[in-house]
Amino acid sequence: MSRRNFLKNLSLSTGGLLLSPAMRAAQARNPLQIPDRYDGTMVDSRVTYSLRPQEGLTEFIPGLKTPTLGINRSYLGPTLVLKRGDDVELNVQNALPEKTTLHWHGLHVPAKADGGPAQIIPPGGSWSPRFRIDQAAGTFWYHSHLLHKTGEQVYHGLAGMIILEDESTDRHSLPRDYGVDDIPLIVQDRRFNSDGSFDYIRSHRDVMTGLFGDRILVNGTLDAVFRPKTTRVRFRLLNAANARTFTFAFDDGRTFSQVATDGGLIEKPIACKSLILAPSERAEIVVEFNAKEPCTLINLPLPAGSQFATRGMMARMHSGNDERFDLLRIEPAATLQHSPEIPTVLAKIPRLNPSDAVTTRKLTLSMAMGMGLGRAGSGGGNFFINGQAMDMEVVNYRVRKDTVEIWEITNDSMMMHPFHIHHSQFQILDRNGKPPKADEKGLKDTVKIGPGETVRFIMRFETYADPNTAYMYHCHILEHEDNGMMGQFTVE
Ligand SMILES: [Cu+2]
């Protein structure tokens, strides 16, 4: 057997561990970039933010310029800091030569302000949604949501973090010094061409599994290193990859504390050694460090037997979630400033009661197999919800304002789909009939649905009514969303 075939066979037999030579530990270490914190400016009693989607060139790889998209910069955008109770205006001035949208992922906003596929901003155009911030503190994000082009625009950089603060933010002893001990980690995988440009969709497989890269960017930094100056650091983990699921852990197996899910603080910290986030999911974790004791934030393969693993004939073409690689090198300073203990009680989350639900909506996610995948080949897409691909002309559900509903999502495909719904945070009732584990008891806007699984969640549709403008629900594997796995609902 030639060495090449030996390696090929070995890589298949180890579940793809050798598939990505670029995932090897890199030698160069670049200081972790921290996106600028953007608090906005007060204009006529509104906190106003100016956001400018634009093209740029970004040097991820020394000596090579990558054509990218960014917001107020060449790649990604500033971290928007929003405060509960504030009236805000987000002025988006589209400096791109193409249309775009900006969606405030996880925020409770009017449908017209949501930044979904209907709120298109033409090249040179602007869009200035206004709304009041009224939800719990947490980590959210904003990104392009352009119909059929979300994957491509987010991949090139149209995304940023949102930190929402409320009355609890100053009360808790959680680390909150942005860029010092409160650190955004926007984690993405990318594939580069030899000229440094991003390599987006190349094959049917890239659409079918969603696009997987073989290099990791954290806040747009390749081979990043972070140097803590305090004994505790809060990391705001955002899986901003198009398709890859990350299983976050540390190379020395250390325990850390999860303190928040997608929609904000959980009731009490959860001690854990690993944490799985699918695309668009967030978690806040607090990690303890000792001076001069480095470690590495890594990605582990999905645990053996995970319900989120790809099954059947798809499993062999989809090893991307089975690789181990480094995400962020961490090198604490020689002396660390002491951080206070984290609180034992974080928040009180009032539970919604299933007996208050006026209806249960049943949605089934599915995908067509075989060739001809991708919109270009098939016209309509190969990813479905209840057998239908996304159609801008179809409002799939009309929800009555101020009602509570249960949504029951079933996955009738061979791979996991992270299901995301706009409008509000939900609470998971059960997964395959069993109550959610601790890390799924908090507020969520995205939930992993493994192959064959059924998840029920409960949600209240309050505050905003608009029979003419829809909110979206969709798979957050962006290539699936772009190719049909999305639907629309109104609240009226
Ligand atoms: Cu999907």
Image: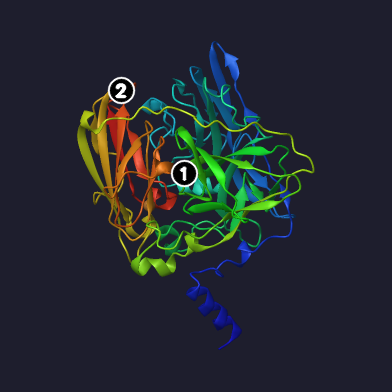
**For the residues carrying marks 1 and 2, which lies nearer the camera in this image?**
1
Helix, strand or loop at label 2? It is: loop
Percent x, y of residue 490: 28, 31
Secondary structure category for the residue under label 1? loop
Which residue of the protein is positioned furthest toward the top in this rendering?
44
Residue indicated by mark 2: 465
Counting from the top left corner in percent of width and height, residue 159 is at: 54, 40
- Residue, x 35% and y 36% (percent of image)? 427
Q: Is residue 102 visible?
A: no
Q: Please state which of residues 307 and 53 is positioned toward the viewer in this rendering.
A: 307
Q: Is residue 146 left or right of residue 458?
A: right
* Relative side of 367 to 171, left or right: left
Q: Can you give x and y, in whole percent of width and height, for residue 56 in the image?
A: 64, 43
Q: Residue at 61% x, 46% y: name it.
A: 68
Any atom of ligand 1 within 8 Å of the CB at mark 1?
no
Residue wearing tag 1: 280
Q: Amino acid at mark 2?
A: Ala
Query: Disc 1 or 2, which lies upstream in sequence?
Result: 1
Q: Residue at x 58, y 22 (%)?
A: 170
Q: Residues within 10 Å of mark 2 (few under 14, many from 20)?
A: some
Residue 446 picture location, percent across and down: 40, 42
Asked if one can make out residue 286 in the rendered structure from this viewpoint, the answer is yes
The answer to whether residue 135 is above or below residue 195 is above
Amino acid on which the number 1 mark rests in the picture: Ser
Q: Residues within 10 Å of mark 1 (few under 14, many from 20)?
A: many
- Report how far apart the C-alphas of labels 1 and 2 lie in the structure: 26 Å
Q: Say which of 15 and 256 sits in front.
A: 256
Distance from mark 2 CB to nearest ligand 1 atom below 8 Å: no
